[in-house]
């Protein structure tokens, strides 16, 4: 079973920030938080990952709470092309085996 | 850099037949993992290959087997196909301790 809990769906207006939450209350000290997204019928796309510090790259920001039991993926200016299923996954670094849940379906609307 | 490439993109097979799917990893990657994604579900881990050996395996029957070649490319074989094997099959590659990157998948339909 997936070790994360995500809302099944979320809506966001184009141009606004999309904040996708994830709970991972049983995360271990050596597990990272990874985010992937999957646009319909395509392979999952890596977005970002982190251990305990907040991370930012050209796609998104990842905010991890101090107790590491939850995190938020932030897409700062959502576009229609960001409509996808977003998966939050916890995994040990170097293990590279991912356990997917059902993710959050993000719908970005004009 | 070509990224992870999979072939074929689509195929249709009949129940009882055998199928082979292929994956070329991203340049510099030596580890290949295979996933099965049924409609409406998240990907499920099948197995992982490293140094031409199966390093990990998920909860899949022995009908599912694989191989990794010296150039790190990999094949997934499924024997005695069932209707329930219809799915999107995804290949992901990584370096030994790095982030996994996925290909676009092979859509298998069993009729």
Image: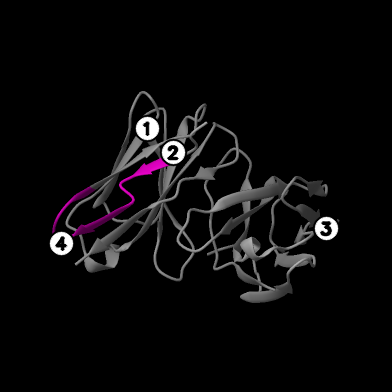
In the image, taking residue B63 as reference, residue B42 lies left or right, namely right
| 3D distance between C-alphas at marks 2 and 1 | 8 Å
Q: Are marks 2 and 1 in contact (CB under 8 Å)?
A: yes
Q: Badge 4 local density, few (<14 within 10 Å), some, or many (20+)?
A: some
Few, some or many C-alpha atoms within 10 Å of disc 1 (few <14, some 14-19, many ≥20)? many
Q: Which mark is residue A67?
A: 3
Secondary structure beneath disc 3? loop
Residue A80 figure quarter: bottom right
Name the chain letter of the residue that bears numbered label 1.
B
Circles 3 and 1 on the same chain = no
**Badge 2 is on which residue?**
B32
What residue sits 77% from the left and 60% below the top?
A74
In-front residue for pair A59/A97: A59
Tell me, yes or no, whether the two marked residues, 3 and 2, touch with CB atoms within 8 Å: no
Q: Secondary structure at mark 4?
A: loop
Q: Quadrant of the C terminus of chain B?
A: bottom left
- Judging by the rendered image, the residue that carries numbered circle 4 is B14
Q: Earlier in the sequence, mark 2 or mark 1?
A: 2
Q: Which residue is mark 1?
A: B73
Q: Looking at the image, is mark 3 or mark 1 nearer the viewer?
A: 1
CA distance for labels 4 and 1: 26 Å
Answer above or below: position of B75 versus A80.
above
| Relative side of A110 to B54, left or right | right
> Does residue A28 lie above or below B71 as drawn?
below
Residues at marks 4 and 3, common chain? no
Cα separation, mark 4 vs mark 3, equals: 51 Å
Q: Position of residue A20 (x, y in %)?
A: 72, 66
Q: Position of residue A100 (x, y in %)?
A: 54, 60
Magenta stretch in the rendered image = B5-19
Q: Is residue A80 left or right of residue B38?
A: right
């Amino acid at each position: 079973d997936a070790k994360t809990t995500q809302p099944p769906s979320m809506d966001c207006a184009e141009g606004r920030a999309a904040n996708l939450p994830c709970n991972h209350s049983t995360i271990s000290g050596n597990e990272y938080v990874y985010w992937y997204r999957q646009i319909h019928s395509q392979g999952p796309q890596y977005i970002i990952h982190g251990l305990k510090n907040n991370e930012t790259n050209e796609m998104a920001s990842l905010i991890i709470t101090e107790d590491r039991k939850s995190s938020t993926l932030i897409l700062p200016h959502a576009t229609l092309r960001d409509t996808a299923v977003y998966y939050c996954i916890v995994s040990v670094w170097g293990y590279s085996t991912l356990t997917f849940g059902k993710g959050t379906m993000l719908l970005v609307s004009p | 850099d070509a990224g992870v490439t999979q072939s074929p993109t689509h195929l249709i097979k009949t129940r009882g037949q055998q199928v082979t799917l292929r994956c070329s990893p991203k340049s510099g990657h030596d580890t290949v993992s295979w996933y099965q994604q049924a409609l409406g579900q998240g990907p499920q881990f099948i197995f992982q290959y490293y140094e031409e050996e199966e390093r990990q395996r998920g909860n899949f029957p022995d009908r599912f087997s694989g191989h990794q070649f010296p150039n790190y490319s990999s094949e997934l074989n499924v024997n005695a196909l069932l209707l329930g094997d219809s799915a999107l099959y995804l290949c992901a590659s990584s370096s030994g301790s790095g982030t996994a990157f996925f290909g676009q998948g092979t859509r298998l339909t069993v009729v």
